[in-house]
Amino acid sequence: MIIGLTGGIGSGKTAAANRFAAAHGIHVVDADQKSRVVVEPGRPALAHIVDRFGDAMLLGDGTLNRAALRETVFAAPEQRQWLEQLLHPLIRDEIITDLRSATSPYALLVSPLLVESGQNSLTSRIIVVDVPEAMQLARTVQRDAVPEAQVRAIMQAQAQREERLRHADDVLTNNSDLAALHAQVDALHTRYMELLERS
């Protein structure tokens, strides 16, 4: 069984995924990590990005300047679309390879764009980490030390809260502390193990 875990930026996806892994030994595949792998130096995607946007997309060590790329694509929807068409199929291939290596009772696919990218087709259930938008904004500005306008642009590019919740089989409400989130994760894990036993 593959379970998708999604939520907007700053919702707490990583904290939830870490709990599944650390407390229950669940194999976690992180789409964000895969998105970094596909643009590593020597990979074709990085060359395509530099061809399109220029050398400003590279840091001194030859790796991708993620901040410059983010600024460029979130300022222009057509550029973001081009980037997604380049990267999404590559990321999907990396995800599938990793999921196939899972040995835990079920695997977790963590992706901020689970629904938008079509990665939800790989999953049999979807967990949404839900948080009020004001909290999302405040957490992300503080965590990433970026301007509020940039966070709002990223939030606009992601599915809206209502849309995400429409796809949810299970919801983790993350508007309290870490202990509250952990308790919800533990309860879900118990439920998934029961579902697997029944099937």
Image: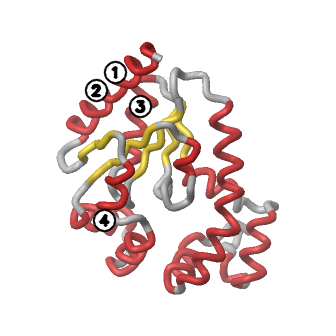
Residue at point 46% right, 30% down? 21
**Element assignment for label 2:** helix
* Furthest residue in direction top, as rendered: 197
Question: Spatial distance from mark 3 to mark 1, Cα to Cα?
Answer: 11 Å
Pointer 3 or 1: first along the chain: 3
Q: In this view, does 76 lie above or below 81?
A: below
How many residues crowd around disc 2 within 10 Å: few (fewer than 14), some, or many (20 or more)? few
Q: Is residue 104 above or below residue 138?
A: above
Question: Spatial distance from mark 2 to mark 3, Cα to Cα?
Answer: 11 Å
The x, y position of residue 191, in whole percent, is: 34, 23
| Pair 4/3: label in front | 3
| Pair 3/1: label in front | 1
Q: Is residue 23 above or below residue 5?
A: above
Q: In the image shown, does 195 or 93 lie closer to the viewer?
A: 195
* Furthest residue in direction left, as rendered: 176
**Element assignment for label 4:** helix
Which residue in the structure is indicated by mark 1? Answer: 190
Corner quadrant of residue 70? bottom right
Q: Name the disc covering residue 20, or none.
A: 3
Task: Specify the amino acid type for callout 2.
Answer: Ala
Task: Specify the amino acid type for callout 3.
Answer: Phe
Pointer 4 or 1: first along the chain: 4
Which residue in the structure is indicated by mark 4? Answer: 142
Which residue in the structure is indicated by mark 2? Answer: 187
The answer to whether residue 38 is left or right of residue 15 is right
The x, y position of residue 46, in whole percent, is: 74, 68
